[in-house]
Image: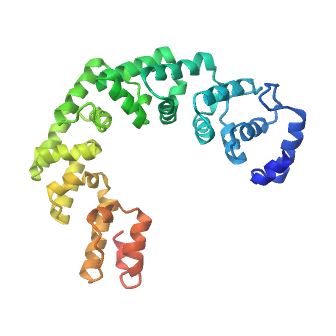
């Protein structure tokens, strides 16, 4: 045991010795013998049974329910391994939901796993779903999980589309959609389809989420505003399909950004429709300062890059500074003044 811990460089020597002496007095194998109150009990258990590093095991153990025996954790781990979890996936699901080790397998876990298999998900699919939706572990099977899945299946229009989204997305199962008025949900679906986003589209979930926070009145006001910048209806729909979150902007903010991008920068409406993520960037902190840097470099004859506006606007801050500002810090200190 001591050689094992030293070899992994997992714990400082004093803690290694505590683990050795502790393990000599209390078994933490799969026997289910009552555990010592020593806080290192579950740390050693996670290291030995799941392959955690001692550091990660220590972090996970802090979120564990009060466990006095290895009996239930052993049963949970055995069940997860029987469902295909092993190695990295086993450690990942326990890290995401440490309380899992305190779950009742027959009452809590087994029905959920069996239900997903009955739906048509493969073993690897179920693993992916649980890792994407770890909150499923906490949902009451009869009162929450089943009603929620039924609502989503109705919204998507088929079980196949529901399963595809379960495999791909990691957030929608955490919404309390089963508590939303069915008429409101139907209206959201109709609005999404009216924009041209079919239920089978990968963007369908995101569009529903965005439209839920955008009234019809605000949506129409934004259409009218964008039309005033020669943004055609097809441009508007194209932008929504690529980056629908710009609809959350206030009409005033959207107008200011469009004025800057179209009138100052000179980007055509059709190009904004292709790069709508520009609309999500801060005008004062990102778009205006970086455009001023570009203008200064060009005016001084120092602009030699072939980078696109997308690269300039979307580059992480440190990378932007390293490439466009720091090389000219001595010759053009005013670059720092505009940032």
Residue 324: image x %, image y %?
36, 74
Front residue of this view, candidates 151 and 31: 31
**Residue at the image point whose x is 35% and y is 20% from the top:** 151
**Residue at the image point whose x is 43% and y is 21% from the top:** 119
Residue 187: image x %, image y %?
22, 24
Q: Is the residue 141 above or below the residue 308 in the image?
A: above
Task: Quadrant for the C terminus, please.
Answer: bottom left
Coloration mode: rainbow
Q: Is residue 71 left or right of residue 190?
A: right
Q: Is the residue 25 above or below the residue 260 in the image?
A: above
Front residue of this view, candidates 294 and 251: 294
Q: Is residue 281 visible?
A: yes
Residue 315: image x %, image y %?
37, 63
**Residue at the image point whose x is 37% and y is 32% from the top:** 164
Q: How many marks?
A: 0
Hey, which residue is sitting farthest bottom in the picture?
A: 331
Q: Is the residue 189 above or below the residue 45 in the image?
A: above
Splitting the image into 4 quarters, where does residue 218 fall? top left
Splitting the image into 4 quarters, where does residue 147 fall? top left
Front residue of this view, candidates 105 and 229: 105
Task: Quadrant for the N terminus, please.
Answer: top right
Splitting the image into 4 quarters, where does residue 323 fall? bottom left
Front residue of this view, candidates 270 and 266: 270
Residue 289: image x %, image y %?
31, 66
Q: Is residue 256 visible?
A: no
**Residue at the image point whose x is 17% and y is 32% from the top:** 194
Q: Is residue 214 left or right of residue 163?
A: left
């Amino acid at each position: 045991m001591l050689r094992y811990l030293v070899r992994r460089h997992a714990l400082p020597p004093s803690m290694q010795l505590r683990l050795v002496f502790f393990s000599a007095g209390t078994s933490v194998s799969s026997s289910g013998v009552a555990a010592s109150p020593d806080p290192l009990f579950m740390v050693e258990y996670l290291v030995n049974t799941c392959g955690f590093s001692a550091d990660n095991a220590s972090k996970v153990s802090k979120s564990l329910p009060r466990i006095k025996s290895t009996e239930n954790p052993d049963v949970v781990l055995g069940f997860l391994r029987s469902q295909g979890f092993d190695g990295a996936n086993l450690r990942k699901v326990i890290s995401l939901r440490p309380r899992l080790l305190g779950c009742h397998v027959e009452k809590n876990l087994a029905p959920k796993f069996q239900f997903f298999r009955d739906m048509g998900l493969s073993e690897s699919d179920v693993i992916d779903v649980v890792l994407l939706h770890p909150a499923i572990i906490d949902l009451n099977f009869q009162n929450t999980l089943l009603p929620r899945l039924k609502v989503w299946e109705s919204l998507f229009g088929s079980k196949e589309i529901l399963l595809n989204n379960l495999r791909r997305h990691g957030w929608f199962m955490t919404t309390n959609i089963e508590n939303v008025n069915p008429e409101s949900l139907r209206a959201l679906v109709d609005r999404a389809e009216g924009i041209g986003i079919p239920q089978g589209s990968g963007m369908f979930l995101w569009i529903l989420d965005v439209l839920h926070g955008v009234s019809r009145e605000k949506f129409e006001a934004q259409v009218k505003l964008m039309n005033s910048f020669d943004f055609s209806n097809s441009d508007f729909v194209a932008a929504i399909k690529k980056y629908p979150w710009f609809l959350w902007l206030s009409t005033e903010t959207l107008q200011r950004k469009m004025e800057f991008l179209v009138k100052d920068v000179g980007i055509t409406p059709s190009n904004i429709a292709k790069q709508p993520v520009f609309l999500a960037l801060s005008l004062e902190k990102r778009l205006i300062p970086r455009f001023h840097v570009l203008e200064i470099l060009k005016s001084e004859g120092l602009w030699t890059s072939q980078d696109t506006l997308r690269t300039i606007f979307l580059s992480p801050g440190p990378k932007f500074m390293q490439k466009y500002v720091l090389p000219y810090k001595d010759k053009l200190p005013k670059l720092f003044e505009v940032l």
